[in-house]
Each structure stands twice: as C-alpha cells, then as structure tokens.
Image (cartoon, rainbow, N blue to C red):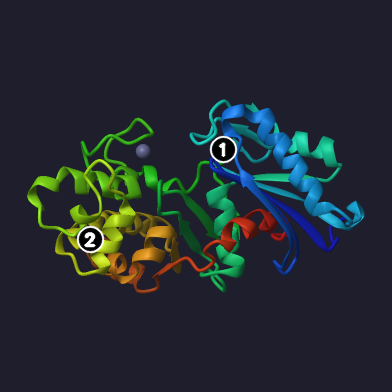
Amino acid sequence: MADAPYIVGVDIGGTKVACVLADAEGRILARRWQPTRASEGWQAVVQQLFEMTEQVLAGTLLSQVRGIGVSCGGPLDSQRGIVYSPPNLPGWDAVPVKQLFEERFGLPTRLENDANATALAEHRFGAGQGTRNMVFMTWGTGIGGGLILDGKLYRGTNDLAGEIGHTTVLLDGPACGCGKRGCLESLASGPSIARRARELANESPESLVWQRATPDEVTAQHIVEAAQDGDTFARFVLSEAATYMGIGIANVAQILNPERVVLGTIAVKAGELVLEPLRRALAVHAWQRVRGVLQVVPAKLGDRAQDLAAICLWLDD
Ligand SMILES: [Zn+2]
C-alpha cells in the first residue's frame, strides 16, 4: 500500500472537523466537514470522523489507499498516536486515535500535531517550497511552531519541539495560558493584541478601533482593519506585537539558522503592517549573517492548509 495513489486526511479542530480524500499531488478528490460535536465528548467526535471518512472513501478500494493522516492540536504522542487533552478539545484524555482508526478501517494511520502537519504542507505546497531549513509559525489565537530541518520534520524528544510561542521574551510579562509569564504568545497572539488595545483604550479614545468595537468585544481583526485604514493607535498596537514576534524569531534564528520563516494568519492578513516592524526587531536582535540568509514571509496555503496538512503525513517518505 506504500505507493497506493490515495490518502485520507483528517483534521480535528475545536470548532470544525474535516475529512478529505486526496492524491499524492495534493489534489482534493472528496471533502466533508462538520462543526465539532466537542461538547458531546470524544466518542461522539470520533464517530463523526468515522462517518465522514466513510463518505470520502465511498467507491474507493481500500487497497488504493496509502493511509490515513490525522492532524490535531497537541499535546499528543505521534509515535503511539495518542491525543492528550488539547485545550480546544475538553475531555480528550489519552484518546488512542491511531488505534481507533486502524481498527475501524484497517488502514495504517499517522497522527501529528496540527502546527507540525501545517509546516509539512507549507514546505511541500506553500510558502516554504524549495527550502531545506524552514520554521513555520501559526500566528492567531495561539502561536505554535513546526520545524523542518534538513528537509525533515523535527519533533524533538516528545513532540514538543518548535513551541516558539512559549519561549520567554519579557521578564515578568503578562500571564500566559500555559501558566508561565512573558511568553511570546502572551504578547503577540491575537487575543494578546486585543488585550493590549483594551489596556490602552482610555489613552486612545479617538481611535477608529473604538468606533468598531467596545473594549469588551475588540479582537485582533478589528485592530488589523483599523490599521489598514491608517489608524495610528491600531498600527502602534500591531507594531508592538510584531516587535515581540521579531524577537522570538531572532531567538529561533540564532539557534537554528533557517533560510525561511513562514508566518500564519496575522501575517497573512496584516502583511507589511506587521512584517516591517518585525524585520526591524530582527535587525536589532539577530546577527547580520543569520538574518542575511533568512526570509520572513506570510503563509500561502490559506484555507487549503488544513486539508493538505493531514495528507502530508503520508508524503514525507
Ligand atoms: Zn506560555
């Protein structure tokens, strides 16, 4: 089955689950998605996934399927294929996803955390194409990372390599969801950007941001849009977050000396509004010979990333 033409990709998210059937060139042949029945417990979600997998497989001989790739938020054990309580999937305590799929479909199954799987997808099909050493960073609700080193995914000892969002960039900084303080994620994620705007709301009454949202409801999206319309305060808040992102990337670059860093959602939406201050921080905090070979670019795959991520688990060998 190793050279069978088709691959099943399964994406398990907190709000949405999706299944695709694809070929080895990443062409999607069938696709199903549903809102995640997360509140009904893991058994209900696995049942959803089984049903969607059956639907995308309809009419396909199992002997023509190379395997099933499953992408899910961590923490997880990729070797044993077990998911351990991701923050967006309450009650998933040691769910043996690999074993469940293998028993149900008789197809070999691989499990990978979503940031790593998306790194593989951007490397093969997106903004990381042609690189040997690439760092992918999600930049949205959280800041996750995936490392491609010497052309291969680097997972670390227990699947925790690349957690750049939880490197410390500010001593005694804001509390982070992980329990530490001053993590990159606590200063530059979407919710952190919104929190910073809220903190400064009284000092910026004239900002366009507050014509679009109250301090209670403001999101990073409001701030990006106001910045795009030229709002000085919104640009300041974004640029501050981007500066921390630049420091985080400088630290990674000093350690790994990559040729490209590919950045997710906020870089895709805000473009130069964040990339410019980010590069300025990089110029201060990374050696010239390190940053001289480094490109920092937005991700390319957009909505296709989730479909391709799980597929890529069967394309790396
Ligand atoms: Zn943290």
- Residue name at image x 28 percent, y 44 percent: 217
Separation of marks 2 and 1 at Cα, in angstroms: 34 Å
In the rendered structure, the answer to whether residue 215 lies left or right of residue 177 reads left
Mark closer to the observer (2, 1): 2
Residue 131: % across, % down = 54, 70
Q: Amino acid at mark 1?
A: Asn
- Toward which corner of the image does residue 22 lie, by quadrant? bottom right
For residue 168, above or below residue 42: below
Residue 291: % across, % down = 34, 69
For residue 260, above or below residue 36: below
- Residue name at image x 69 percent, y 28 percent: 43
- Farthest front residue in view: 211
Task: Determine whether the beta carbon of the residue marked 2 sits less than 8 angstroms from the nearest atom of ligand 1.
Answer: no
- Residue name at image x 20 percent, y 55 percent: 211
The kind of secondary structure element at disc 1 is: loop
In the rendered structure, the answer to whether residue 9 lies left or right of residue 240 reads right
Residue matched to label 1: 158
Q: Is residue 69 visible?
A: yes
Q: Amino acid at mark 2?
A: Ser
The kind of secondary structure element at disc 2 is: helix
Residue 27: % across, % down = 71, 68
The residue closer to the viewer here, 179 or 14, is 14
- Graded by Cα atoms within 10 Å as few (under 14), some (14 to 19) or many (20 or more), the crowding at tag 1 reads few
Q: Which mark is residue 239?
A: 2
Task: Tell me the quadrant of the picture where the C terminus can be found.
Answer: bottom right
Task: Tell me the quadrant of the picture where the N terminus can be found.
Answer: bottom right
